[in-house]
């Protein structure tokens, strides 16, 4: 099919242009030969790339929190769940040097991958509940480390062991492990993100609950560099605690360095403490969210409740303050859902991006081969950009659901829709001009035609430049492939 395409766009809100567009809109509403559709947001949770709820299947201790789920239970009832999160100690994956237990990750991962979901991972090197999160054979190979007891720091008879994070033997063995892990998972389309979890107790980038030893920014940068060396095609993130658990501010050498390497931010500290110390690094997140999805993890729900730190309004506020794209399910998932369903539904309306087609205008009938224009109004009602991007496609189908004609506006990327406060998203008007199935002429008497005249259904979608839908929209009329029916169009014979 040959297309004649063009685009015009403007942000509604500029005084002169808004008036001009409104006049056109009124004119078209009064013209019987135009279809005018005003779409409503259904309010449903969306599962889209680079956003969603992350369910802690393993939370350091592998019995938390997926152990009570049947192998067939993938929490399909949790609205907006997009990712299963697997956080385990290094020693569980490489109990002997060069011998890997990847099944620990792959088994739960495949349950969610089979449902079209993704996984995320963190591999830790220090835990406060087991002696060797870093494999014991690393110490036996000569890596320097420290015995510690939580709350006391380094003590001679400490029951747990933490490596010296700058020790060359430790870093050598860690690099070998990361190389093996990257060979398996880097660039894997089923992996949403990987934490840089090799530094700090629980992989959180701090030592205040372990040895209490301080390390230089150069050591922390080595851990960033090692991950970036091997994970070149998968989103990486660091914990906010790399800069200090409660250090306020927007710019720090380590976080700025991570950002410069294409690493995003994760805050593991939402509602650990009661207000007003519910979180510390929303200001730092302002450096990251315009470029990469920001990830939030709230405290273990039960622990937060017991300390009086849990607050539903703050739960929602954290998403707004951080412009968060991901939020954890950090407890027994259905308990968290059942006791917080109201605020979870509210978060789903704002977390990540939410592309809304507000209105669409197109002719009731068009002729084969003759250009015509579709006018649309779009907004992003979420707190974050549509990081994967996407392009509007118009698909025309017959009454059997067969695809008759596909046309893609490849000029405007939905990533460029502006982010605004709740209910204040800027609306962008887009026009797209194309023609359906011109005649293909070969000589004065020979021609062929790709499309026949008839009455067809018109669908809209957002995705790749080739017309493949990728982004779910909050509208009715989904054909099961993320195309949304707008209405009818009559295709007439060429004049």
Image: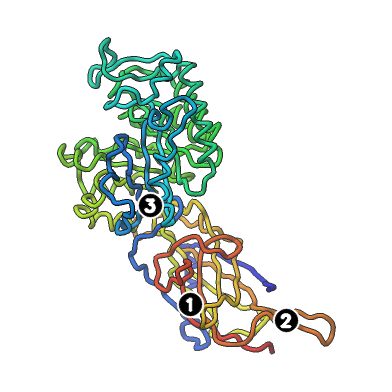
x, y (%) of residue 1? Answer: 68, 73
Asked where in the image residue 88 lies, by quadrant, the reply is top left
Rendered location of residue 481, percent (x, y): 48, 67
- Seen from the viewer's position, the closer of residues 268 and 386 is 268
Q: CA distance from mark 2 to mark 3?
A: 46 Å
- Foreground pick, 57 / 446: 57
* Residue for badge 2: 439
Q: Which residue is mark 3?
A: 52
Residue at numbered disc 1: 25
**What is the quadrant of residue 434 in the picture?**
bottom right
Q: Secondary structure at mark 2?
A: loop
Whole-percent x, y for residue 394 in the image = 55, 71
Question: Which residue reaches farthest right?
Answer: 443
Q: Does label 2 or label 3 sit earlier along the sequence?
A: 3
**Residue in the picture at 41% in, 41% down:** 105
User: N-terminal of the two: label 2 or label 1?
Assistant: 1
Q: In the image, which is nearer the foreground, mark 2 or mark 1?
A: 2
The answer, for residue 323, to whether it is visible in the render is no
């Amino acid at each position: 099919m040959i297309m004649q395409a063009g685009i015009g766009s403007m942000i509604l809100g500029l005084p002169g242009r808004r008036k001009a567009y409104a006049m056109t809109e009124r004119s078209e509403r009064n013209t019987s030969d135009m279809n005018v559709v005003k779409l409503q947001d259904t309010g449903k949770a969306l599962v889209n790339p680079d956003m969603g709820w992350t369910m802690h299947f393993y939370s350091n201790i592998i019995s938390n929190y997926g152990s009570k789920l049947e192998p067939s239970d993938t929490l399909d009832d949790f609205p907006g769940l997009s990712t299963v999160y697997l956080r385990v100690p290094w020693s569980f994956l490489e109990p002997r040097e060069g011998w890997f237990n990847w099944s620990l990750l792959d088994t739960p991962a495949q349950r969610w991958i089979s449902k079209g979901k993704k996984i995320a991972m963190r591999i830790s090197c220090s835990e406060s509940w087991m002696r060797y999160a870093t494999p014991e054979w690393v110490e036996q190979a000569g890596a320097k480390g420290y015995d510690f007891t939580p709350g006391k720091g380094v003590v001679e008879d400490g029951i747990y062991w933490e490596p010296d994070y700058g020790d060359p033997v430790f870093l050598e063995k860690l690099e070998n492990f990361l190389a093996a892990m990257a060979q398996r998972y880097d660039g894997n389309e089923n992996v949403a993100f990987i934490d840089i979890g090799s530094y700090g107790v629980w992989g959180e980038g701090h030592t205040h609950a372990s040895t209490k030893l301080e390390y230089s920014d150069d050591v922390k940068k080595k851990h960033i560099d090692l991950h970036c060396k091997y994970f070149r095609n998968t989103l990486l993130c660091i914990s906010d605690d790399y800069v200090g658990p409660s250090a306020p501010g927007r710019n720090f050498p380590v976080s700025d360095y991570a950002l410069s390497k294409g690493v995003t931010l994760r805050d593991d500290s939402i509602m650990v403490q009661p207000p007003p110390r519910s979180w510390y690094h929303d200001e730092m997140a302002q450096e990251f969210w315009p470029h990469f999805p920001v990830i939030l993890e709230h405290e273990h729900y039960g622990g937060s409740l017991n300390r009086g730190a849990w607050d539903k309004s703050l739960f929602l506020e954290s998403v707004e303050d951080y412009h968060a794209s991901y939020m954890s399910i950090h407890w027994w998932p259905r308990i968290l859902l059942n006791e917080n369903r109201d605020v979870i539904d509210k978060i789903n309306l704002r977390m990540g991006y939410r592309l809304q087609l507000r209105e669409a205008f197109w002719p009731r009938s068009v002729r084969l081969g003759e250009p015509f224009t579709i006018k649309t109004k779009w907004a992003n009602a979420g707190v974050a950009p549509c990081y994967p991007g996407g392009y509007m496609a118009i698909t025309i189908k017959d009454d059997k659901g067969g695809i008759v004609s596909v046309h893609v506006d490849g000029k405007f990327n939905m990533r460029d829709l502006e982010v605004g406060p709740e209910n204040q998203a800027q609306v962008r008007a887009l026009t797209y001009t194309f023609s359906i199935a011109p005649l293909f002429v070969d000589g004065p008497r020979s021609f062929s035609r790709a499309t026949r005249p008839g009455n067809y259904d018109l669908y809209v979608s957002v995705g790749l430049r080739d017309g493949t839908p990728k982004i779910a929209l909050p509208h009715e009329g989904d054909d099961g492939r993320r195309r949304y029916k707008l209405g009818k169009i009559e295709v007439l014979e060429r004049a």
